[in-house]
Image: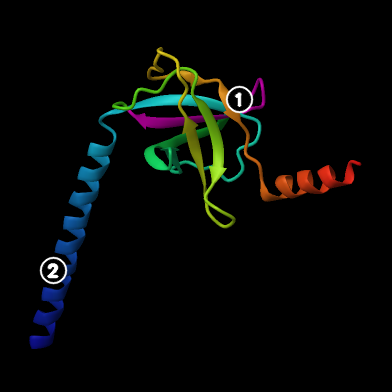
Amino acid sequence: MNRGMAETLIGAIVLLVALIFLIFALQYIDSSNDNVINLKARFYKVGSLNIGNEVKISGVKVGVVIDRSLDKESFEALITFSVDADIKVPTDTSVFIDSEGLLGGSYLRLTPGISDKILKDGDEVFKTRDYESLEDSVSKIIFMTNDK
């Protein structure tokens, strides 16, 4: 009978820890979506950029990629991302797909412009630069040295 009581107690503790984790996760999810604006950008090549990847300004996380789809008319990748609403993003901001080193993941890098006009929820950023893979960079270097 002692063994059955110990198993029941351990099961109750596991359920309690799982419940606390679930409550914490729900609070985090609810608080993270309160104060953001959603922006869009189009690219011809996005590499390994996926939903959930970070959006950074000067190396600091300011948002997250929330959607990745294909525009069926222009065949461009349409990336939707969120940015903290406290950050006033100028309309002449540039968006780059960058990577965190050779083995790191991809992220969106925003380079704010100097315009007085600010992007609003649902606006599109038009100054973009496509993802450049390691193979693309190496081939540029090889062909640059062979063009004599």
Is residue 132 within the magenta segment? no
Image mark for residue 12: 2
Which of the 4 image quarters holds residue 132?
top right
Which color scheme is applied? Answer: rainbow
Q: Amino acid at mark 2?
A: Ala
Please tell me which residue is depicted at 60% across the width and 25% down the height of the picture.
Answer: 71
Q: Position of residue 90 (x, y in %)?
A: 42, 19
Q: Which quarter of the rendering shows the C terminus?
A: top right
Question: Would you place residue 23 above or below residue 60 in this image?
Answer: below
Measure the alpha-carbon separation of dots 1 and 2: 50 Å
Which residue is painted at 24% across and 49% down in the image?
Answer: 25
Q: Is residue 1 visible?
A: no
Q: Which residue occupies 40% across, 13% down? A: 116
Question: What range is drawn magenta here?
Answer: 71-84
Q: Nearer the viewer, residue 118 or 68?
A: 118
- Badge 2, how many Cα within 10 Å: few under 14, some, many 20+? few
Q: Is residue 23 left or right of residue 38?
A: left
Element type at mark 2: helix
Which one is in front, 39 or 24?
Answer: 39
Residue at 29%, 27% in the rendered image: 86
Q: Amino acid at mark 1?
A: Asp
Upstream in the sequence, badge 1 or badge 2?
Answer: 2
